[in-house]
Amino acid sequence: MLEHGGNLRAAALRYRRDDWIDLSTGINPWGYPIPPLPAEAWHRLPEPDPALSAAACAFYRAPALLPVAGTQAAIQALPRLRPPSRVVVAAPSYAEHAHHWGRHGHSLRQVPYAQLDEVVDDCDVLVLVNPNNPTGATVPAQQLRDWAARLARRGGWLVVDEAFGDTAPGLSVAADSAQPGLIVLRSVGKFFGLAGLRLGFVGAHPALLAELADLLGPWAVSGPAQTIARAALEDRAWQDATQTRLLLASEHMRMLLGAHGIEATGTPLFHWWPHARPEAFHEHLARRGIWCRLFSEAARGIRLGLPANEEEWRRLARALDEWSEA
């Protein structure tokens, strides 16, 4: 398996400490409060809940959505729904996309974001993350609609992973996802801080959603996950307050990094910057019980999520001071 953030058990074993601040993911540290669950959420087989789909469609402003066990399930399944194709995956980006498109007989190229418009007419499938993970790069919605139309005329696909899109709704093309050739992935784990639910949604043409549902099989999403996600998706007061809280925390992080000469990009949920010695910086933080995301190859640099409280902010600030003074 590919390496990802959140691997605290490995960190604890390697550094022999358990007082970690986990900044290695872009997951909201102030997750949605779990409501009481009815017994039937555990007892019954988890048939699809129309109320969950309705709540998701309203929140994501999409005409139709298929609940899946995290967008990872869709990332692994979509390459199996096409014959061998010419696939372009935007790079650097979330590595699972290229990994799985490369495993099912497709011809794969990884292309920088700035060059995507040059290759859209020379591929059958174009895959990108918007906003991008880890760099925060974005593509305007109108550009995506144009690419989707150009690909659809040839039976192609545009796959847009909007896992971090909840804090940038103006970039989303979920509202257009019923048109042939456009596939949009949305995640409940990031903005809502509920990564443990393993729940995401896929927006696409109804025929493609039916194929994907058939491939994934019955009971793809647990009953508890459906119940919790429905509450979160319907709670507009919590969503509005969280948007504000994340923006303030993001600005705090930007200023803290800037005070140490670091110019970062990203989203309200994470910050990333290229680094000449990312391994050394990662080691420096790890020795102080701060687990960040190291990118040693593509997107060579460091990504930091948000600290959860004032003590974590202070520990991060001290670690940055010590790095600057070294």
Image: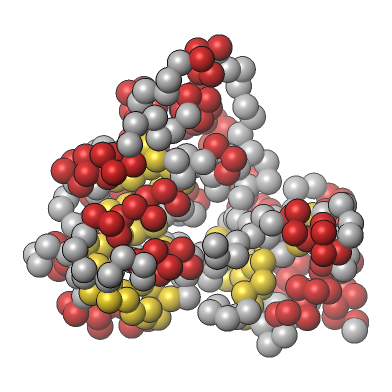
- Residue at the (68%, 46%) spot, across then down: 29
Outermost top residue: 39
Q: Can residue 148 be seen by looking at this rendering?
A: no
Query: Does residue 272 sit above or below 19 in this rendering?
Result: below
| Quarter occupied by the N terminus | bottom right
Rendered image quadrant of residue 303: bottom right
Q: Is residue 69 left or right of residue 28?
A: left
- Residue at the (73%, 79%) spot, across then down: 279
**Residue 227 in the image, given as x and y percentages of width and height:** 49, 23
- Residue at the (10%, 67%) spot, across then down: 154
Outermost bottom residue: 276
**Residue 288 in the image, given as x and y percentages of width and height:** 88, 65
Outermost left residue: 153
- Residue at the (51%, 41%) spot, across then down: 198
Q: Nearer the viewer, residue 151 or 225?
A: 225
Q: How is the image coloured?
A: secondary structure
Q: Nearer the viewer, residue 317 or 108?
A: 108
Q: Nearer the viewer, residue 98 or 22?
A: 98
Query: Does residue 238 sit above or below 118 in this rendering?
Result: above
**Residue 309 in the image, given as x and y percentages of width and height:** 80, 47
Rendered image quadrant of residue 147: bottom left
Q: Is residue 36 left or right of residue 51?
A: right
Number of marks: 0
Q: Nearer the viewer, residue 266 or 8?
A: 8
**Residue 161 in the image, given as x and y percentages of width and height:** 39, 57
| Quarter occupied by the C terminus | bottom right
Q: Can residue 271 be seen by looking at this rendering?
A: yes
Q: Is residue 182 left or right of residue 16?
A: left
